[in-house]
Amino acid sequence: MIKVIFFDLDDTVVDTTKLAEMARRNAIENMVRHGLPVDFDAAYHELMELISEYGSNFNRHFDYLLRRLDLPGNPKWIAAGVIAYHNTKFAYLRTVRGVRRVLLDLQRRGYRLGIITDGDPIKQWEKILRLELDAYFDEVFISDYMGVKKPHPKIFKKALRKMGVEADETLMVGDRLYSDIYGAKQVGMQTVWFKYGKYANRELEYLDYADFTVRSLEEVVEIVRGLNSEEREEGSD
Amino acid sequence: MIKVIFFDLDDTVVDTTKLAEMARRNAIENMVRHGLPVDFDAAYHELMELISEYGSNFNRHFDYLLRRLDLPGNPKWIAAGVIAYHNTKFAYLRTVRGVRRVLLDLQRRGYRLGIITDGDPIKQWEKILRLELDAYFDEVFISDYMGVKKPHPKIFKKALRKMGVEADETLMVGDRLYSDIYGAKQVGMQTVWFKYGKYANRELEYLDYADFTVRSLEEVVEIVRGLNSEEREEGSD
């Protein structure tokens, strides 16, 4: 009997990848507009390389971009990048299509909901609060707060303990086969792989750990109903 | 003959103090709304004390606020503070009343304009670019970039050198008697104290260094015209 459904945050509940790409493009465009003496494509390519090396939470992207381009540090160019990046992020932050309806539907049917995510705790809470998603979820578990990253079992076990359920009473929904699906399955949760965003065709070596694969979150509601009615039927045997 | 007019940035060109106060109040209000178990006045008082101890550019205000209130670190409360703070800053950033008209008027009359300011270079450029003030000024000098703070003569001398003028061909306009007025006078500039904002009644021991005192920036135009016509008259004697 499924009692709790856990969701990953980025590219499962919040449409993060599209937003980040748009924000980075606008940042470079604004830097060029304010005098950065490099063409858009060259600068954007360099930024993407930098992010893949230093990670997306590194907070000196634009500063390091100038170093990589052999340009002097110029606070005007950096400010132009920061402004466009923040404006885009604040204006275009969105949930994944259909997610609010699904969360509301699950809540109405009596399921408890949680988030299990990696990432900087303050930045993750910023997304949740800006989108007013906090009311949908009973608990939010952020792995950085525990000093681990998914698929480390510690974060999944903590979530089970805090919600007071056994692993087989839960479902984990996420876009990453390695972090979300392999991670959740390791502790015994049932798993739904949301084939979406930049990980839609990656980490396929972990595909076996997915009990279900969906391309739309609406399908999660059907999966939960299916699992629970199956069990009721078995119980009545 | 005055050729160049320098302006301080915060509370001379940009209305910073009012904005910061509004942003801090909204931040605390949003933290309380999201469950911070302290009343508004207590938390606001603690935040103001923290800022006076750690400075306004310290970037862990909300984090340290929780420590001071003997509360556990909670990324949700911090995110609530950060969101409200940023939203307020972006929505309510304003120039000081009348400043655009004055800058345009001075530019039309053939004067070159510059900014001489303390503060984090990227944050200062953010204010300038967000308000589209960059086109008014020929040069922006930010002291942190030179490792000093006003009234250190280094920043004023650099500004004179870069603009290619003698000190007595310039006027410095600022709200702080110590940093702006005493600093500029030390290198031989003429000085206009803008009696405005939280420094309107402070550092009065440096009042003697102000050649002029104004309560509105419009008066700067008259002062410059007066100084230059006086000199022309003397020249024709």
Image (spheres, coloured by chain):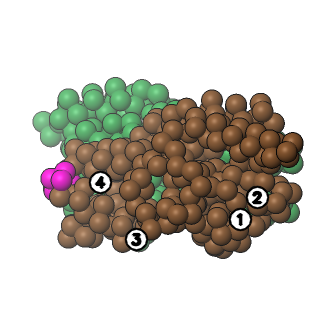
Chain colours: A green, B brown
* Chain letter for the residue marked with disc 3 in the picture: B
Q: Quadrant of the N terminus of chain A?
A: top left
Quick one: label 4, few (<14), some, or many (20+) residues within 10 Å?
many
Residue underneath mark 1: B188
Residue under numbered circle 4:
B77
Q: Find the distance from the CA under tag 1 to the CA under tag 3.
A: 33 Å
Asked if residue B103 is among those painted magenta in the image, a careful observer would answer no
Mark 2, residue position: B168
**Badge 1 or badge 3: first in the primary sequence:** 3
**Residue A23 visible at all:** no
As measured in the structure, the alpha-carbon distance from the residue carrying label 4 to the one carrying label 2 is 52 Å
Tell me the magenta residue range.
B35-41
First in sequence: mark 4 or mark 3? 3
What is the spatial separation of the Cα atoms under label 1 and label 2, in whole angstroms?
A: 6 Å
Question: Secondary structure under badge 2?
Answer: helix
- Amino acid type of the residue that numbered disc 4 sits on in the rendered structure: Trp
In this picture, is A210 found above or below A122? above
Q: Which of marks 2 and 1 precedes in the sequence?
A: 2
Residue under the image location 42 percent in, 49 percent down: B197
Q: What amino acid is at disc 2?
A: Asp
Instruction: Determine contact: label 4, label 3, CB under 8 Å.
Output: no
Q: Nearer the viewer, residue B151 or B219?
A: B219
On whether disc 1 and disc 4 are found on a single subunit, the reply is: yes
The earlier-in-sequence mark between 3 and 2 is 3
Q: Is the residue under label 2 in contact with that under label 1 (CB below 8 Å)? A: yes
Q: Is residue B234 left or right of residue A154?
A: right
